[in-house]
Image (spheres, grey):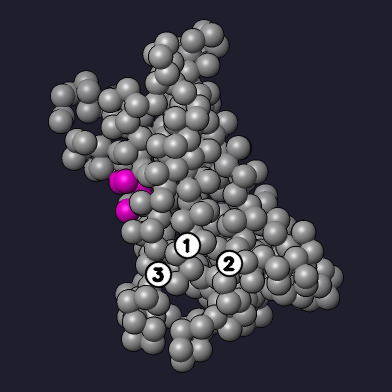
Amino acid sequence: MATSDFVLGDVAAMGAGVFTNPVEVIKTRIQLQGELAARGSHAQPYKSVFQAFVTVAKNDGILGLQKGLAPALCFQFVINSFRLSIYTHAVEKGWVHNNKGEISFARGMFWGALGGVVGSYCASPFFLTQLQAQAAKQIAVGYQHQHASMSDAIRRIYRKNGVFGLWRGSMANVSRATVASAVQIATFGQAKSLLKENGVITHPTVLSFCSGLAAGSFVSVAITPLDVITTRLYNQGVDAQGRGLYYKSWLDCVLKILQSEGLYGLYKGFWPIYLRSAPYSTLVLLFFDELIALRERYDLH
């Protein structure tokens, strides 16, 4: 596996992350809004995606839309260095192709999922939605942690719950990232192959852009419930023994959300997830393809 694949995957993902982190902040706030409360029985500072942007900018300042950017970029650096390079290596070795030499959707999903599992588990300590959730008192939702920065958050978590505290909720993140990565990468490869083979789009940049947009659309539909669960598990407070104050486990989280918020609760934040997933998938895969093209052009192996 070429070292350059790791580097290119990192750069592509972090570049996309800068643009999409504000949507991630809004998504996190909406998912935590009305946590374990019946619909309509709680304060609703975030009423829509656009209104949420205005509310955050007004109360937390314009930089409030980039809360948690540092750990978000670190998370993307780690997870994508694995998943994109693993998938690219599989493509180069022909492991995602069928007997006819065509890209297999099922094999693409497998290698995409494998990369997602490895990357998301290793990146788990940087999944700090706790920082994205921190807000001014009048618009605060969910459990409010008082972290000063990414390093402060990691230090506090480690001091309170040890190294295992940094991986609390990691299994939920692994399942979320596995589905997201499998759907994103497999759909991207399949869409790109279909569009190119049928002559619909031939320009490389436009082809990557449209394929990435298709991938992001499918991802947002597939992962919303998993994303809600992951956000809730990572953001909840813990007691002295490191046990969650709200949820005991992944299953307990699902059952409590269904019981108190209904099925609607598992789909909170669908639109910001879509607005984040579609452009993110488009940007990261477009950037990655363009960087790969530059590498091949100038033989930067």
Mark 2 or mark 1, earlier in chain: 1
Report the residue that reaches farthest toward the front: 99
Of the pair 127 and 71, the residue shown nearer to us: 127
Q: Which residue is disc 1 drawn over?
A: 171
Q: Answer whether residue 153 is visible to the viewer in this image.
A: no
* Residue located 67% across and 50% down the image: 271
3D distance between C-alphas at marks 3 and 1:
8 Å
Judge by depth and name the residue closer to the eye, 85 or 207.
Answer: 85
Q: Where 285 sits versus 241, above or below?
A: above
Determine whether the residue tagged by mark 3 lies in a helix, strand or loop.
loop
Residue type at numbered disc 3: Trp
Which residue, given by chain and number where applicable, does mark 2 sit on? Answer: 250
In the image, residue 294 lies in the stretch drawn in magenta: no
Q: Position of residue 48 (x, y in %)?
A: 72, 57
Label 2, label 1: how far apart the Cα atoms are: 8 Å
Q: Which residues are magenta?
A: 78-82
Give the residue at x 52% y 8%. Answer: 199
Q: Is residue 175 above or below residue 148?
A: above
Q: Secondary structure at mark 2?
A: helix
The reply to whether the C-beta atoms of the residues labelled 2 and 1 are less than 8 Å apart is yes
Which part of the image, by quadrant, shows the C terminus?
top left
Please state which amino acid type lies under the numbered disc 1: Met
Foreground of the two, 21 or 238: 238
Residue at 32 percent across and 38 percent down: it is 86
Q: From the viewer's perspective, is the residue at label 3 or at label 2 nearer?
A: 2
Task: Name the residue at the right extreme.
Answer: 40
Q: Residue 26: which quarter of the image?
A: bottom right
Q: Which residue is mark 3?
A: 167
**81 magenta-colored:** yes
